[in-house]
Image: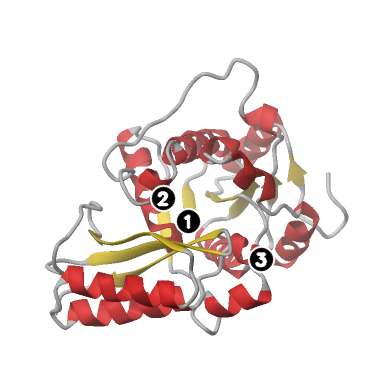
């Protein structure tokens, strides 16, 4: 249940399926925007896109414990369901699916989904088991919602590729749609984790995006990848980041590592600032 004016909140799979079945009997296309809550304008842009692309829209809000390899990270992940519902209220969301953990992972749950290839390296290396947790919960959410279309942000580019491969390989009849990264005026990619930064760290955070842009320009101008990436790494650390977890050039089509910009690619990075892990990526194309 939810307050008047707020989107209805569904907590049980049986109730969600009953609702979706009624919508589909009316001939409605069902869209889903999976989130972990702590919503920001990036999430809201996905909801707006879903409203344009489906007659009925579900936003899922579930902090998925299976994708956290660090219990402390799970504990401190921001949660604000009341605030999330208030943000969604004017957007015409038809339902918010916010299940308790035991509804998604009941006692005796023993299945995990592993997507090879695109899940390897990058966030997959730094967060062991992370993408198994993502793939498992997304597969479950696709089945629970019976969605025809699903919207994901391109900021989590590797995750988007994992989800696309998951749907393709398991013959899940859902169209996975990627939407551009939404940024603050200073270039910082919107993220729920940004709210964990102090004011000082927040002022330093845009250096990650600036370094990626500078490296992209160098790569597109023909500079060797090792040189461009090393220069970007030094710039990120000089801005006050404690550690660069990865900074890599990958093929956009299959996430394969690239030594030079010879095909459409993504430059991807993860770096730590004030104990907060920030990720970003930008698209590149050979000239």
- Neighbor class of circle 3 (other Cα within 10 Å; few <14, some 14-19, many 20+) is some
**Marks 3 and 1, Cα distance to the nearest angstrom?**
21 Å
Q: Earlier in the sequence, mark 3 or mark 1?
A: 1
Q: Secondary structure at mark 2?
A: helix
Percent from the top left, x then y, of residue 22? Answer: 65, 38
Percent from the top left, x then y, of residue 42? Answer: 56, 67
Q: Nearer the viewer, residue 165 or 207?
A: 207
Task: Work out whether 243 lies above or below 73.
Answer: below
Which-is-in-front pick, marks 1 and 2?
Answer: 2
Residue depicted at 48% across the width and 41% down the height: 134
- In this figure, which residue is indicated by the disc labeled 1? 152
**Seen in the image, is 283 located left or right of residue 286?**
right
Q: Are marks 1 and 2 in contact (CB under 8 Å)?
A: yes
- In this figure, which residue is indicated by the disc labeled 3? 195
Question: Is any atom of residue 284 visible in this view?
Answer: no
Q: Secondary structure at mark 3?
A: helix
**Marks 2 and 3, Cα distance to the nearest angstrom?**
21 Å
- In this figure, which residue is indicated by the disc labeled 2? 159
The mark found on residue 255 in the picture is none
Q: Are marks 2 and 3 in contact (CB under 8 Å)?
A: no
**Marks 1 and 2, Cα distance to the nearest angstrom?**
9 Å
Task: Work out whether 228 lies above or below 26.
Answer: below
**Seen in the image, is 106 located left or right of residue 86?**
left
Percent from the top left, x then y, of residue 14? Answer: 68, 28
Residue depicted at 35% across the width and 34% down the height: 171
């Amino acid at each position: 249940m939810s307050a008047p004016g707020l989107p209805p909140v569904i907590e049980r799979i049986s109730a969600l399926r009953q609702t979706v079945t009624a919508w589909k009997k009316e001939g409605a296309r069902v869209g889903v925007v999976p989130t972990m809550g702590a919503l920001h304008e990036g999430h809201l842009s996905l909801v707006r896109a879903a409203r344009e692309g489906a007659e009925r829209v579900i936003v899922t809000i579930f902090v998925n414990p299976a994708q956290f390899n660090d219990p402390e990270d799970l504990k401190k992940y921001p949660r604000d369901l009341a605030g999330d519902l208030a943000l969604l209220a004017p957007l015409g969301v038809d339902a918010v699916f916010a299940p308790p953990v035991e509804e998604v992972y009941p006692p005796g749950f023993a299945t995990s989904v592993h997507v090879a290839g695109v899940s390897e390296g990058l966030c997959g290396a730094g967060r062991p088991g992370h993408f198994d947790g993502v793939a498992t919960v997304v597969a479950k959410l696709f089945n629970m919602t019976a969605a025809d279309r699903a919207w994901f942000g391109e900021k989590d580019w590797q995750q988007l590729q994992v989800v696309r491969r998951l749907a393709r390989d398991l013959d899940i009849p859902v169209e996975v749609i990627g939407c551009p990264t939404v940024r603050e005026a200073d270039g910082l990619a919107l993220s729920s984790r940004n709210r964990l930064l102090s004011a000082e760290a927040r002022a330093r955070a845009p250096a990650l995006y600036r370094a990626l842009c500078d490296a992209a320009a160098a790569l597109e101008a023909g500079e060797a990848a090792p040189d461009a990436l090393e220069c970007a790494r030094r710039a990120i650390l000089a801005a006050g980041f404690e550690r660069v977890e990865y900074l890599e050039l990958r093929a956009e089509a299959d996430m394969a590592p690239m030594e030079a910009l010879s095909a459409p690619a993504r430059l991807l990075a993860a770096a730590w600032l004030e104990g907060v892990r920030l990720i970003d990526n930008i698209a590149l194309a050979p000239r």
